[in-house]
Image: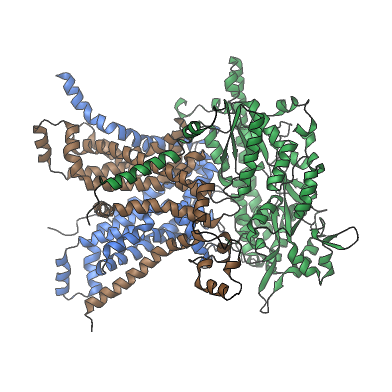
Amino acid sequence: MPRHRLLRTLTPYLYIAPAFAVTATFGLVSMGISLWASFQHYDTYAGASGFVGLDNYRRALTGDDSYFWLAMRHTVVYVLLSVAGVLATALPLAMLCRRARYQSLFRTLYFLPSITPGVVLALVFYHIFGIWGQLLDSAWTALPALALLGVWAAAGYNMVIFLAGLTDIPRFLYDAAEVDGAGRWQQFRHVTVPMLRNTLVFVTVMTIIGSFQVFTSVYIMTSGGPERSTEVIAYTIFLNAFGVAGQMGYASALAWLLFAAIFVFVVIQMRVFRSRRVYDE
Amino acid sequence: MRARSWTSPALAAALALLVLAVVLRAGMTRALIARVTADGPPRPVQLRVWDWWSSSTNEEYGGYFAELEATFERRNPDVDVVYQTVPFSNYVQKLSAAMVGPTPPDVFQSSIIWAESSYRRGMLRPLNDLLAADAHLPASQRVDEAAFLPPAWRHNQTVDGTVFGIPQIIDAQCLVWNLDILEEAAATDPEIRAMFSRLEDGTVDYEHIRFDAVRDWNHFRQLIGKLAVRGPDGQLERAGYVIHAHGSGADIFSPWLASNGGHYQDLAGTRALFGGRRGAETMHFLARLYWTDRVCPPFRRQLFDRELFQQGKVACVTAGTWSGKDIVRDTMGWTHFGKTAFPPGPSGSGQRSLTWGNMLVVTTRCRQVDAAWKYVRFTCSLEGNLLRSRHLGYNGPRRDFYDTEQWQRALTERPYLSNVKQICLVGEKFRHIEMEAANHQANPVFESLLLHYPDVVDGTGAYPSVEAALAGAAANVDNVYRRYNEQAASWEAARDRATAASGAVGDQASAGDPARASDPGPAER
Amino acid sequence: MMSRGRLASRLALALMVLGAVVMVYPYAYMVGSSIKSRREFAEDKAGIVPPRYQLGERLRHWRGEASALDWPGADWSAGRNYADAVRFGDIDRYLANSFIYATIITAVQLCLNVLAAYAFARMRFCGRELLFMLLLATMMIPPAVLLIPNFLVIRSLGLVDTVWGVILPGFAGAFGIFLLRQAFLNIPEDLEAAARIDGCGSLGILWHVILPLSKPALVTLGLFVFMGAWNMFEWPLVVLSNQDFYPLTVGLSLFRSQTGADWPRVFAASVMGALPLIAAFLLAQRYLVGGISLSGMK
């Protein structure tokens, strides 16, 4: 009967409709509106007040008092420090955790920062960085200090991911390598790292995407200082959207430029380190 | 490890208790619960009042609001006043969000830094008509221009005389001196002894410091140099004056600039004026206090000026006349400090400070202007001023406030208030346009100059010279002002278009809500 | 002489313990500082144990010398800052609000995600691949970029400064749909076929077959979503003005005023803010850790 058939064809759409409505509205439609706003002057209260074409983008990229490039520079430095820090801490930690006992206890302890709100961590570290030699006072140490906070907070989470990746490496590969005369370090280089390739890519990409958006620690701890050294792009966007009259359009333009930057970074990353099957079966 | 069964009775009971506690305490059910637990019928008129003063930062504010609310509600039994605290640093953003939302404030305390831009955005209701209708009231209840000291009535009106706020306090930036330290030094130094005022019989009055205790900048340097105490190894044990370079920027710089005859911005807020000779002189003066005279404690983000002052580690600090009660609270009772204005610099004349008068405003989305105006008038009347003085130790912006017995009593109980009126009277207009954006441009420059002054002077710093740095910062702030004024002009134009259009239809409602009418939203484009 | 393996294990354990101390130190600092009085915090920022409990100070006091017990506030009770945070800072209201937001978002998102994931996993319909790609595309957009756009949408919908405005964007998530689709695809189709023979419709299959078998994925996702909703900061910061509706994170940032803050009280509020999630996490630890490894293998 046609009614049944209609229902049968419509059912899948009915199933996905609510979820799709929400994600599309707050993903795609909102990006569209933001694109429209980036061509305007827009005030949070008074609304849109004039089409300006590419003016906001021009100002962001070439304006005298635009901090876009400065903020991008700082953000990229932060991202690089975060990635380096995460790889340097989480992987060794995971390997240590495998060798040590009380694994689940350690997993819990190390995971604590991941389940603590970022605001709480920022408030505590604001003082801890003060105790550890005024790290937030100097333009040289402030941004690395924030990166340190980010790495510390993500150590447990990434350690657990690496743990899972390590457990999936078959034992016989190590045995075979040992038989072939490979030492510890060579085993690491030739067995562990290749087998962890996918996990490494995953962790790196997630860290890049996450650290590009660092905001809470800057907002709570440094407000962009000292001397603008911790001004990151998400903070600049926030400031221009809500702290300056009528510049929400400009902030939208900045947000789109940030999106483009992240997109480019991730595409490069995925191209260079394409996920592949590492061994044949 | 076996997961605990989710249906065990203990866990279920705990969960149920948790849910109950959450529902009872959550913000969403607050109004409902208040209605249920209220004694007596609900009052028909609800007045939403916003402020950043909060009992969570100082409990005395709680007492003040409690008495204010009780007195007003007793006199106006049909009105229910509901307060909301909004943090100072987020105020504009929160205001913008609320004014387009379902629960906008009816009345709020506006800092001078948001007031004019809020008015130009169309958030504030002009008050001239309400003021005119009050002409029959006794003087102590009137809140028109004649009732206030001139410095208080600067920030609350436009150039053409439209009043959009009524001042409820008057504040000024001032120098606060630790009189314990001064008294100790005065025992051996006649110059410091001369800073104190004299009693009628000629003896030194160690409770009060003279308003003009410091003659000029050079005199300030000398005095501070004497008050700084160095240990045997040359390290500073007690500092003379503290400069908080991190993030305070303009708040340190501008009062000294004013005392040097300069200004941060012009009166109308269209140009930045700190980039000239006077600004450079001021910056040199401040930086030399730190780098040459070495009378300041090290620059530390977490060492706030007032904290150091309260711990007795510094003799003099820049603070607001409003901070007296906070010092008393944080030190749990210490009142032996005094305030002076800023002494004149080489290009200035006379003692100076910067004043402002935070005001109460009525929003354009106020649902009952009558009740709102009564509240504003009450809070800014002489009675309201006395209330604030009683709870918070503030001096009022009204002329008649200083004739009251209560003020005389306050002067004896809190001797640190003695110079406050004079300091307010010599105050110039505090800068008030787009402060967050201007600070974003200029404060890092001030910070750099203070932190790396020797390098800048040598020519190896981030800037070729102090003068060049300030000129560059001023140019950027000019851009901020220019953009703001363009935006404000376009808002006003849009509002005029909207009122013209709705005027043709004769729609009263939209005339009172012009901002809504001027924003068609993306869907209609 | 210990075997090399055992020595290595001991060394690894030692290093892990060192690392654990580094992890836990800020929490210890937070708890310790939350017990200090204002004066104690100003005098001794770095210590974990409040001066009035320190052995050295107590000895000095007992000997009659000047000590921390002479400071004003030496009789500060341990729970005083916590009580103040509740009384003056309404921290319990913010906790309750966070709880409500997180619960509603988790419940609704689980429902909507399950429906959508099931459709993508098991049903055939025109445009399935395209729509799924679109969904993945939204996952690519970082939240910081979406802050302003979502605000503009909420503003157009007239939901600024409302509870709905805060929770609406969280009602569905591409990540969740993706995760659940993976989990559903792993369930053998014969079970479904059997259920269908027994006369179950799609919803019945969902309820009786799919959901029970994908419990780990559901719990994992639920915990992720709950955590994410609990920790959200910028979004409610931007959308809300009415203090009554602030979640915990925004409420915490309220404790700092422009002129510094009552730090011990801020720490007390922070401890109260961090505890609920830690408790929830400990309760559900088994599922959560298993789940992360699931999403790690991409």
Can residue B276 be seen in this snapshot? no
In the image, residue A226 lies at what x, y percent?
A: 56, 59
Identify whether B22 is placed above or below B281.
above
Question: Considering the image in quadrants, where does the N terminus of chain A appear?
Answer: top left
Question: Considering the image in quadrants, where does the C terminus of chain A appear?
Answer: bottom left
Residue sitting at the far right? B201
In the image, residue B29 lies at what x, y percent?
A: 45, 35
- Identify the image quadrant of residue B138: top right
Colour given to chain B in the rendered image: green
- Identify the image quadrant of residue C40: bottom right
- Identify the image quadrant of residue B195: bottom right
Q: Foreground residue, B92 or A128?
A: A128
In the image, residue C26 lies at what x, y percent?
A: 44, 62
Colour given to chain A in the rendered image: blue
Identify whether B422 is placed above or below C68.
above
- Number of numbered discs visible in the structure rendering: 0
Identify whether A109 is placed above or below B402.
below
Can residue B151 be seen in this snapshot? yes
In the figure, is residue B490 to the left or right of B128?
Answer: left
In the figure, is residue A270 to the left or right of B389?
Answer: left
Question: Which chain has been coloured brown in this picture?
Answer: C
